[in-house]
Image (tube, helix red, strand yellow):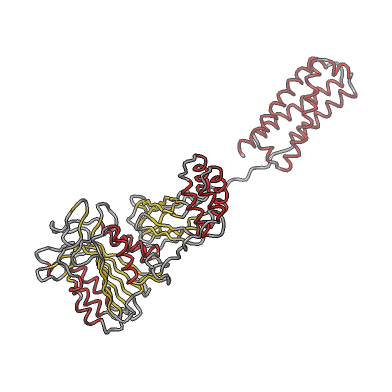
Amino acid sequence: MTDRPKKALIVVTGTYGDSRLTALRAPPQDAAALAEVLGDPTIGDFDVAVLRDPGCQELREAVEEFFAERAAEHTLLLHFSCHGLKDGSGTLYLATKDTRCVRLASTAVPAEFVSGLMLASVARRAVVVLDCCYAGAFERGILTRADTDAHVEDSFQTLGRMGGGSQRGRAVLAACGAVEFAREGTTAAPSFFTRTLVKGIRSGDADLDGDGEIGLTELHEYVCDELRELTPHQTPRLWVFGAHGGDLPIARAPARLAKPPPLPEEVAAHVRSRSPTRRLWAIEDLESLLHGDDIGLALAAATALERLSGDDSRRVADSAGKVMSSARPRVRQDSLDLGTIAMDSPMPAVVITVEGAPLVHSTLEATADAPWLAAKQVTDGVEVRVKEVPQPGPHEARVLIRTATGEASVPVQVQVGRKEMGAVSLLGHQPWKSPPPPPPRRPSEPLMHWPFSSAAVFLAVSLSVFLFAADPGSAFGSSAGWLTWPVVGVSIVVNTVVSLRVRRDAAVSRSMASSWGYSALTVLLATGTFLLFGVYIRSPATIVAVLSLTCACIAMLIGAIALWGAALSG
């Protein structure tokens, strides 16, 4: 445990070696629910330890260690969720996994042992909570958790006599009276008593006087009222000893919304109207209030919209439902992957960002459905962290986000591994190694530009010769001329542009599209030049022009090869 002044030990025993002791479903659930709310820094702020299915000697040592070596400022809370048994003289015993019903004195822990250690502790405040199960019997699908002859207060009579004049507060809170049953449901959920206890602390409803602090007397009164609805024949009992005004503070009450104010009269009148049209008008006003900064009116608007979403008019019900859907909490992460962590290593917190109207953030509550995961509200949303690293391997859980306007659920995954040589080794896998960096990319060699410059020069010479030295009519009047000379003109422009781009190492000169286009132009020019050989070999001037075209074709062929090489290597 850490150095926090509030310490809690939760002892849960659900399995027993003695066949006469029925296995209990509730204790593991009791531990998870109670540990979460007591350990919340904003509510209980206890340093919580959980002891599951201990043996008799193990429990004795754990309880003694819990009460020993404490300072005066400590507040201690010890919670038992287990079977309770009594011997022939009425002494109360707390059952452990190795308890034998015929040998209680040597295989179970007497309540006087606990009360003696609690009284001897120097801690200023100490509380024992008993959610004890006595002779378990199944009746109408409910497990009974009491013996009609048990008297819990008798087991702490020594504490009562000695604690009255002490300046140290001591208390015992029991799940039921002397002749009553303490019950747990037929499903795997906390017992009625612990479930109600956790609900009162987590919601703040147990803060009956509204002072922001939950005292044990308030908590007892709240649990009694709530249990009366669940099981009317179970009445928890409380014994408080010491000079602390008859109460011991247990937790801080979370901030609660005040009762929402009434809606503006005009809006309320539209909501109550028999006219569907007027109720539709009301929905427009309610939408503005729902998204507004006045949390009380927003909560009243949400209540009215929920009622209108079940309206007899389909239009009214659909409109109200759409408005409520628009105000639901929105999370940016569809799922949360916490990655790979090592056992026994601290896990940094990760925040799930929640967006929505002011009412969403004012009423936001978050819980995790796995004991190893903790979720709590923060300014921007919900903070998630691994509080108890589970066994190696993959683990999944869900974070449930509840608000006054709806709920959202975020799946959470984590992979737990072992530490090996400074790395995290997953179960059944080799330690992860980062992939080697890719080899450095060889810089591309500069593309030669002379084929394109030469082709442009040769093409310009051939065109000039035909224009000024040859007969223009014969040069451009045939079908060969109509094919060749437009290609020559385009080729001059293309080669000039490509030459300039190559000099600047532009990316287009290394693309596949450039290679295909330049190759097609080269083929067209070569075809035209071949035709000109048979048509224009009539004078020295035309011979020079055709030879210049031939040199241009050769230069362009070299340029096409160069472009293809650059595109394939780039």
Relative to 336, say whether 537 is above or below: above
Closest to the observer: 105 or 391? 105
Image quadrant occupied by the N terminus: bottom left
Relative to 223, say whether 268 is above or below: above
Does residue 11 appear left or right of residue 379 in this picture?
left
Q: Position of residue 28 (x, y in %)?
A: 27, 58
Closest to the observer: 277 or 318? 277
Closest to the observer: 395 or 363? 363
Relative to 134, say whether 569 is above or below: above
Does residue 155 appear left or right of residue 560 in this picture?
left
Closest to the observer: 86 or 463? 86
* Residue at 30% in and 71% down: 77
* Residue at 73% in and 29% down: 556
Q: Position of residue 413 (x, y in %)?
A: 40, 51
Dividing the picture into quadrants, the one containing residue 25 is bottom left
Q: Position of residue 315 (x, y in %)?
A: 52, 40
Residue with the most extreme front position: 274
Image quadrant occupied by the C terminus: top right
